Amino acid sequence: MNLRDGATLGRAALRSVSYLLRGDIEFPEGRLQDTVETADGTTFVVYRETVRRSAGSDEAEGGAVLVFRMRVTDPAARGPFRTALFDPLANVATPFFAGLPGFRRKLWLAGEQPGEFLELYEWGSEADARRFVDALRSLIDPVDHAGTVEFDVVPHDSVEEYVEAGQAAWREAPPEANRPPRRTAVFTGLAGIGVAIAAGYALRKRLRR
C-alpha cells in the first residue's frame, strides 16, 4: 500500500469513529438472509448490511452501485477469508469504507459455493465509488494469489434499482452451504471503533516522523 492510499484509509477510519460514536452507522436486519441471483446464475445470501444514516442529506450527484465479487480459489485460504469476512470481531473493513466520502450503504453476501463472496455498495457518485476501488485494490494486492476479484461501477442510486434493472434478481430460498452464523451488530461496531482508533493513531504517528 502506498502512502497516499494509507492516508486516505487512515482519514476514513478516523471519520468512521465519529460516525459510529454518534450513531450514524447502522446495521439493519431487514435484508438479512435475502438471496440475490447474479446474471450467471450464482446465488448469494445477505449476511450483513451497513448503512450511514445521514448519507442521503449530503450527496448532490447521481448515485452509483459498486459490485465487488471475490472468488477464493485457493482451498487453504477459504477458511481464513471466511473468518475475516463473517466474524465481526475479525472484520476490519467497516472503519475504512464507512468513513470514505460518498459512502451510503453496503450489503455483504456469501455465495452458495465455498469461497464465493459478493459485496454491493451504494455511493454518492461514480467518482466516490472509483476512489474506493483504488484504495481497495491496494488492500487486496498482497493476497491476490488466493483467487480472483471483479469490480463493476454502475450508475444506479440503490441496490434495489440495480436489481430491478435486470443486473440480478431476488430469490426466495437462501443457499445453505456457505451461510454464515448470524452475529450482533454491536460487536461489529465496537470492534470497528477499536480498529479505527488504532489505525488512525498509527498513521498519524507515522506521518509526523
Image: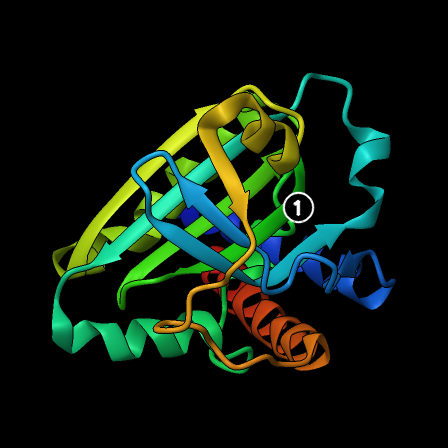
Q: What residue lies at 39% left-to-right and 40% top-to-bottom?
A: 38
Q: What residue lies at 57% left-to-right and 52% top-to-bottom?
A: 107
Counting from the top left corner in percent of width and height, residue 109 is at: 48, 58
Residue tagged by mark 1? 105
Q: Work out whether 162 lies above or below 26.
A: above
Foreground residue, 181 or 171?
Answer: 171
Q: Work out whether 69 lies above or below 127.
A: below
Q: Quadrant of the C terminus?
A: bottom left
Q: What residue lies at 44% left-to-right and 73% top-to-bottom?
A: 179
Q: Is residue 73 left or right of residue 158?
A: left
Q: Is residue 165 left or right of residue 102?
A: left
Foreground residue, 19 or 56?
Answer: 56
Foreground residue, 105 or 202?
Answer: 105
Q: Work out whether 97 lies above or below 128.
A: below
Counting from the top left corner in percent of width and height, residue 19 is at: 78, 57
Q: Residues within 10 Å of mark 1 (few under 14, many from 20)?
A: many
The secondary structure type at the circle numbered 1 is strand
Q: Quadrant of residue 80?
A: bottom left
Q: Is residue 92 left or right of residue 102?
A: left
Q: Is residue 2 visible?
A: no
